[in-house]
Each structure stands twice: as C-alpha cells, then as structure tokens.
Image (cartoon, rainbow, N blue to C red):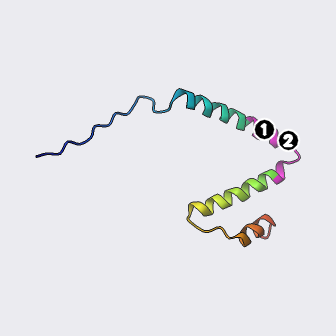
Amino acid sequence: MPQKLPVYHFPENPIDPAILDAFLRVDEALSRLDERARWSPLQAPWSQRLLFRNACAAMHTQHCVVHLDDLVLLDGHAF
C-alpha cells in the first residue's frame, strides 16, 4: 500500500507584515547610526571593536574554541 506523503502549504508571503515592518525600522536606524558614526571621534575604536566581534564570530562559526589569550592579543593589536 503506498504511503501518503504530507502536503505542505507555503504561504504567499511567509514573513508577517508586523515583523517585516520591525526589520525595516531596524534597518533604517542602523543606517542612521552608521552615518552618525562616520563623523564621530569614537569611530576608530568602535570599528576596531566591531572587527574584534567579527573575529570572535568567525571562530565560533568554524566551531573553534576562542581562547582568552588570543582575544587579549587581538584586542591589544598584537597581530
């Protein structure tokens, strides 16, 4: 006897309009923050901190353990 396979229904727009509106507001706020940060005296340390966070995230995505010694050296511009 053949098995009945489940039938899936995919909606026309899978993203709820309320969530989409929230994403658009966050995107606009980040764009404004980037523009303000471009001319801020704190731009250089902030971008260094973002690079630091990106390096940690890259190591986590590769399933590597992030060693505290490496983080301290990276933060101290040893590389």
Q: Label 1 neighbourhood size at 10 Å, few (<14), some (14-19), many (20+)?
A: few
Asked which quadrant contains residue 70, the reply is bottom right
In the rendered image, the vertical position of residue 59 relative to residue 42, given as above or below: below
Let me know if residue 39 is in the magenta part.
Answer: yes
Q: Is residue 64 left or right of residue 42?
A: left
- Give the structural element (helix, strand or loop) at label 1: helix
In the rendered image, the vertical position of residue 38 relative to residue 29, given as above or below: below
Considering the whole magenta stretch, tell me its main secondary structure: helix
State the residue in front, 41 or 11: 11
State the residue in front, 4 or 46: 4
Rendering coords of residue 36 (x, y %): 81, 38
Quadrant for the C terminus in the image: bottom right
Rendering coords of residue 22 (x, y %): 62, 31
Residue under the image location 20 percent in, 42 percent down: 4
Asked which quadrant contains residue 49, the reply is bottom right
Q: Label 2 neighbourhood size at 10 Å, few (<14), some (14-19), many (20+)?
A: few
Q: Residue furthest bottom?
A: 69
Q: CA distance from mark 1 to mark 2?
A: 7 Å
Residue that numbered label 2 is attached to: 39
Asked which quadrant contains residue 24, the reply is top right
Residue under the image location 51 percent in, 30 percent down: 16
Q: Which three-letter amino acid code belongs to the residue tagged 1?
A: Glu
Q: Decide: marks 1, 2 in contact (CB < 8 A)?
A: yes
Q: Is residue 35 left or right of residue 63?
A: right
State the residue in front, 41 or 20: 20
In the rendered image, the vertical position of residue 77 relative to residue 23, given as above or below: below
Residue that numbered label 1 is attached to: 35
- Give the structural element (helix, strand or loop) at label 2: loop
Let me know if residue 53 is in the magenta part.
Answer: no
Picture disc at residue 58 = none
